[in-house]
Every structure is written in C-alpha cells, then in structure tokens.
Amino acid sequence: MTTIAMPRFAELAGQLFIDDARTRAVMRQKYDAMTPAEQNSLFGPAADYREFYSQARDIHLAVSRQTAKLMYMLARSMRAVSVVEFGTSFGVSTLHLAAALKDNGGGRVITSEFEPSKVDRARANFEAAGLADLIDLRAGDALDTLAKDLPDRIDLVLLDGAKQLYPRILALLESRIRIGGLIVADNADMCPQYLTAIRDPENGYLSVPFGEDVELSQKLR
C-alpha cells in the first residue's frame, strides 16, 4: 500500500482539503466585501506579499486535490530524493511530496513558510502523518531561507508561495536543479513574468500548462 492510501495519511489529507475549502470561502467573502483599492493593495501586481500572507494566516491556500496527486506521481515516477517547495502553508503539498519520497525509499523535502503560525500547524501535521523526518521546514522569507544550505542536486521544485516571487525563487534554485528536473508552479497565471521566462526555449526549459492554472516545466540544460 502506498503512503497516500494509508488511513493515517488519507484521513489527515482529506480533512485538510475540507478545511481548505472552508477557509477559501471565508477569504472570498472578505475579498468581495473589499473596495477595488483594497483588493488591489492585497492582490494586485504591486501588493506587499508579507502583508497578504500575514492576513491570510488562517487560510489554507492549498494546492488542489488533483495537483497534490500530480506532485506525488511526478516525484514517484522520477524517483526523486531531493525536493524544494516554496510556500508550505499547512503542509498539504508537502505531505504528498514527503509521501512520495518515503515510497521511493527516502529523501528530503525542503520547504519554506513565511507565516509563523502556519509553521507550527504544518509541523503538527507532519508529525501526525508520520513524515516529519523527511521534511526540513524553514521558517521565514524564502528569499533568505532558500538562498543557503541547499543540496547540490534538486530533482523537483514546487512553487506555491507569493506569485510575484516565482522568478526570484527559481533564480535561487535553478543552478542546482538537475538536467531533466521538474518545476511545478501553482497559480502560474498570476505571474506573467514567470511564464514568459519559463516558456522561452532560450532559457533552457520545456514548459506546458497543466490543468487550469499549473505550469509544468522541465530543465533541459
């Protein structure tokens, strides 16, 4: 039996997806009640991501169930042992990545989360799933936490934090991403600059949209 099919994991992940739907509904209500200026200050291109994630401390902001399964499948199929994630939140995607590494025989997921309260809750979820030993959760701004102490070879990257930072986070990691390594960017349509760069063959990637808002890219050189 795979780790994601085990009752301990499946029950926890299922509850987290339910909580995600509930808290997103709350966020939508708050968004709809805002003035256009308030909406732009939090969600616009020039928004302060620190302020947004502070206000969204109780919002799960998880990947979809389909994307979570995709992450597990990709990590399993490429026999990944080294994964880096930008944006932990409560750890839904992290758990699926760590489950894949466990089923691959071991490895490490390095993940970074800005909001302190989410760090504590994610750690509790990792312990509850029995996968904490596979996860290196770094608290703080990913521009700092993912700028050091990285493995020489990264198999798989998940981008799911502040969308405007996607190009800068990739720049921190790409020299260590192995040839054939994969980058998955959730809500990639919210960062046109990232899509322009990752889809340009001159930059050494092959990239395709997947589903509604996921960009799947492979490093070719």
Image (cartoon, rainbow, N blue to C red):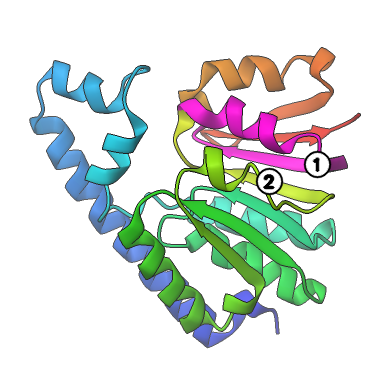
The residue segment tinted magenta is: 164-187
The image's mark for residue 69 is: none
Relative to residue 143, is residue 129 depicted above or below? below
Residues at discs 1 and 2 in contact (Cβ within 8 Å): yes
Residue wearing tag 2: 157
User: Is 49 situated left or right of 79 in this image?
Assistant: left
Q: Residue at x 28, y 52 (%)?
A: 59
Kind of residue sitting beneath label 1: Ile
Q: Quadrant of the N terminus?
A: bottom right
Element carrying mark 1: strand
* Distance between the alpha carbons at the discs numbered 1 and 2: 8 Å
Q: Nearer the viewer, residue 193 or 74?
A: 193
Residue 176 is covered by the magenta coloring = yes
Kind of residue sitting beneath label 2: Val
Element carrying mark 2: strand
In which quarter of the view is residue 38 placed? top left
Q: Position of residue 211 (x, y in %)?
A: 57, 37
Relative to residue 146, is residue 34 depicted above or below? above
Q: Nearer the viewer, residue 163 or 189?
A: 163
Residue wearing tag 1: 177
